[in-house]
Amino acid sequence: MPLHLGTGEGRERPLSVNPFVGEANPAVAMTEAPPKHRLPDGPLPPSTAYQLVHDELMLDGNSRLNLATFVTTWMEPQAGVLMAECRDKNMIDKDEYPRTAELERRCVAMLADLWNAPDPGRAMGCSTTGSSEACMLAGMALKRRWALRNKDRYPARDVRPNLVMGVNVQVCWEKFCNFWEVEARQVPMEGERFHLDPGAAAALCDENTIGVVAVLGSTFDGSYEPVAEVCAALDGLQERTGLDIPVHVDGASGAMVAPFLDEDLVWDFRLPRVASINTSGHKYGLVYPGVGWALWRSPEQLPEELVFRVNYLGGDMPTFVLNFSRPGAQVAAQYYTFLRLGRDGYRAVQGATRQVATALAEHVAGIGDFRLLTRGDQLPVFAFTTAPDVTAYDVFDVSRRLRERGWLVPAYTFPPHREDLSALRIVCRNGFTADLAELLVADLDELLPELRRQSGPLTRDRRAATSFHH
C-alpha cells in the first residue's frame, strides 16, 4: 500500500461542486465548497458529500476490465446484500458475534478437507485480511518452531534464521523476512524456468533454515511450482544430513483452482512435509476483497504460545491474527460462496475461466507478434512477450495503448537473472467472460497496425512505464 504524503493546501482551489447538488439553495452549494486537504469547517448535506466522492471515483479504472488484478471483481447480488447486512460486525468480537465465528470455523474445516488434511478435525486455521497476512502468520509459525528446536543456540549473534524461496514470490514474503529479521534466500530464474527449482532450493538449506516456500501459481506467469518435487528434494536432504525442513505452500490463487481442475496434482497436505497452506478467499475463492485463509496440518505445526484463545458459548475459539478489528462480511460471503457453489460449482466456474484464458492465449499466439511464456492451463493466467523480430514496439507500448481503451494489462520486467525479459500478463477471473475476451482481442487487433508503424519503442524508462511492479 502506498504511503500518501499530506499536501499543504496553500492557494489550491477547493473542490468543485455542481450547483444543482445543493439540498435547497444552489448558490450556497457553490460558495461553500469544501477544501481538499483539511477538514471542512462545517458539515455537508449527505447527497452533496456522496456526489463529490462518487464523481471523483468515476476516474478510477473499471475493475471488470482490470486484467492485472487477481482479486474478485464480480459477485452475485445476493452476496452483496449479505455483505451489507454484516458490514457492521467486527470479526474479532467472537463473543458478541458467535455465529460469524462459527462460519469462520466451518470455512476452515471445509478448506482442511479440500486440501486433504490427515485429520480435518484437528487442522488449525483462521481467516485473515488476505494472503499477505496469512503468509506473515505462516512465516511466524515456521520461525517460532525453528527457534524452539534450536533454543540451545538461538538467539545468538552468529545465528540468523533463513527462509528459502524462489525470486518470483509475492512481495509479502520479502516483507516478512524484513519485518521478522529472517534472511531471504532466493533461487533465481534461469533460462525458461521462471520459478523455484527443487534442487537449488534444497542446496540453499542449512541448520538455520526455518522452511521453504513453494508457490502454487506464480504471479509472474501463472505457473504452478513443483511442490511435490520440492518436498522430494528436501526428503533427500534429510536422508543425507538429518535436516528436517518444512514446506509452506503459498496457494494464494492456485489453492482454489487446483483442487477442482487438477485433482491428480499432489501439492497439499497429502505431502507430509507440507506444514501449512494459505489462500486468498478474495482471489479464486470468488469473494470481494479482503479475506484470506491460513491453515496448518495439525496443532503441532502451530506453536501454542502464538495462539490466543477466546471463549464463546462455552467453546474455545483459537485466534492467531495480526489485525484486530476487521469486518466479518467477507467471512460470511466466503461461507455463502462455499454453500452456493460446492465442489461441482467451483469446478464449473474455474473451468470456464481457464477455457477463456487458454483460448485467449491461443489467439495471442496466433497473431504472430507475440511469444507465449505460459498458456493459461494452470492458473487461468498467461504471460507473453514480443516476438524476437518485433522491433517497432515493446510490451510497454502495448500496455499503454490498451489502457487508452480501458483495459488494464500490466507490462513488467522479470527479476534476476532474467531482467532482460519484459512481458505482459493477463489474469482471467470469473466475470471476465468470453464476450469480454473477444472485445479485448478486437481492440488488440485494431491497435497493432499502428504500433507496427512506429520507428521503435516509445518507452524510455521501463520502470516508470507501468505502475505494476509484481
Image: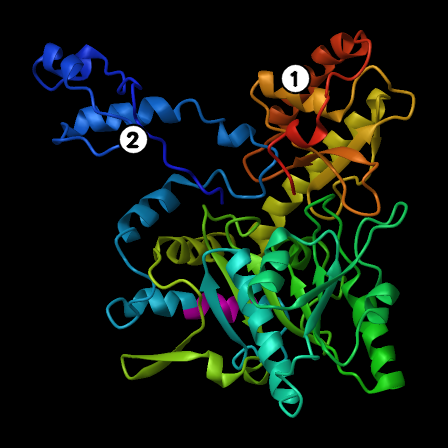
Residue depicted at 22% across the width and 28% down the height: 49
Nearer the observer, 234 or 298: 234
**Labels 2 and 1 touching (C-beta < 8 A):** no
**Quarter-wise, where is residue 349 in the image?**
top right
Is residue 112 visible from the viewing direction of this image? Answer: no
Report x, y in % for residue 20.
18, 12
Q: Which residues are magenta?
A: 105-113
**Quarter-wise, where is residue 420 in the image?**
top right
Residue depicted at 53% across the width and 43% down the height: 71
* Badge 2 amino acid: His
Horizontal arrangement in the rendering, residue 315 relative to residue 409 (left or right): left
Name the image quarter holding the C terminus.
top right
**Quarter-wise, where is residue 230 in the image?**
bottom right
* Other residues around mark 2 within 10 Å, as few (<14) / some (14–19) / many (≥20): some
Q: CA distance from mark 2 to mark 1?
A: 33 Å
Judge whether residue 104 is colored magenta: no
Residue depicted at 60% across the width and 21% down the height: 403
Residue 401 tag number: 1
Nearer the observer, 131 or 272: 131
* Badge 1 amino acid: Arg
Is residue 2 visible from the viewing direction of this image? Answer: yes
Nearer the observer, 345 or 246: 246
Judge whether residue 110 is colored magenta: yes
The residue at which mark 2 appears reads as 37
Disc nearer the start of the sequence (2/1): 2
Report x, y in % for residue 385.
80, 30
Can you say whether 115 is above or below 42 in the image? Answer: below
Can you say whether 304 is above or below 280 in the image? Answer: below
Report x, y in % for residue 119.
59, 81
* Other residues around mark 1 within 10 Å, as few (<14) / some (14–19) / many (≥20): some
Q: Secondary structure at mark 1?
A: helix
